[in-house]
Image (tube, rainbow, N blue to C red):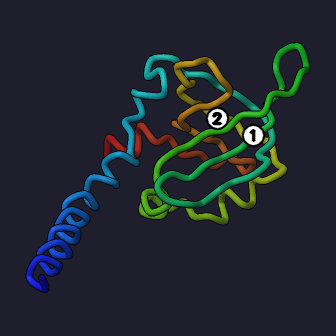
Amino acid sequence: MKRKARLTIFYIFLGVAMLTPCASLLAHHSPSAIFNMTKKVSLTGAVTKVDWVNPHIVVYMDAKRDDGKVENWKFESNPPRWFTKVGVVRADFADAIGQKVTVEVLQAIDGSNYGYLRKITFPNGNQISLEEAQQQ
């Protein structure tokens, strides 16, 4: 009986060990699965919040449309570590909260106010283009 119990516990641990790596694969997604990789949208507005978290930073912005109506946008981008490697730190985004920035994003396939941040121009004029930085 003890041997059967040990085998059962062994198989449970073996099953969990085999499934654990798969969980991270399910959590990550390709940008092309959510974002229209050919539809770039330029927006100008005030940054309202920044989540400097893994696996992607998230930037929230209030952008004014041509008719004056304010739209709330959410952008995800590369991981924090990627930004620090190219010289952009959390403080750069924190300093932009409440300030006017210009962004270029790839809009969500469903047309919602959700996008993948590809380029940002900060209030001080500094900018980062993720496309150019990734090509270097």
Q: Residue at x 71, y 44 (%)?
A: 60
Q: Report the front residue among 97 and 16.
A: 16
The residue wearing badge 2 is 103
Q: Report the front residue among 54 and 80.
A: 54
In this rendering, the label closer to the viewer, 2 or 1:
1
What residue occupies the far front of the structure in this picture?
1
Q: Residue at x 64, y 25 (%)?
A: 42
| 68 relative position to 43: left or right | right
Percent position of residue 75, x then y: 61, 39
Rendering quarter of residue 2: bottom left
Q: Residue at x 80, y 36 (%)?
A: 62
* Amino acid type, residue under disc 2 in the picture: Val
Percent position of residue 128, x then y: 54, 46
Query: In the displayed structure, would residue 3 be above or below residue 117?
Result: below
- Checking the image for residue 23, the label placed there is none
Mark 2–mark 1 contact, CB under 8 Å? Answer: yes
* Image quadrant occupied by the N terminus: bottom left
Q: So how many labels did they put on this image?
A: 2
Asked which secondary structure carries label 1, the reply is strand
- Checking the image for residue 61, the label placed there is 1
Q: Badge 2 local density, few (<14 within 10 Å), some, or many (20+)?
A: many
Percent position of residue 77, x then y: 52, 45
* Amino acid type, residue under disc 1 in the picture: Met
| 25 relative position to 101: left or right | left
| 125 relative position to 57: left or right | right
Query: In the displayed structure, would residue 111 be above or below residue 12?
Result: above
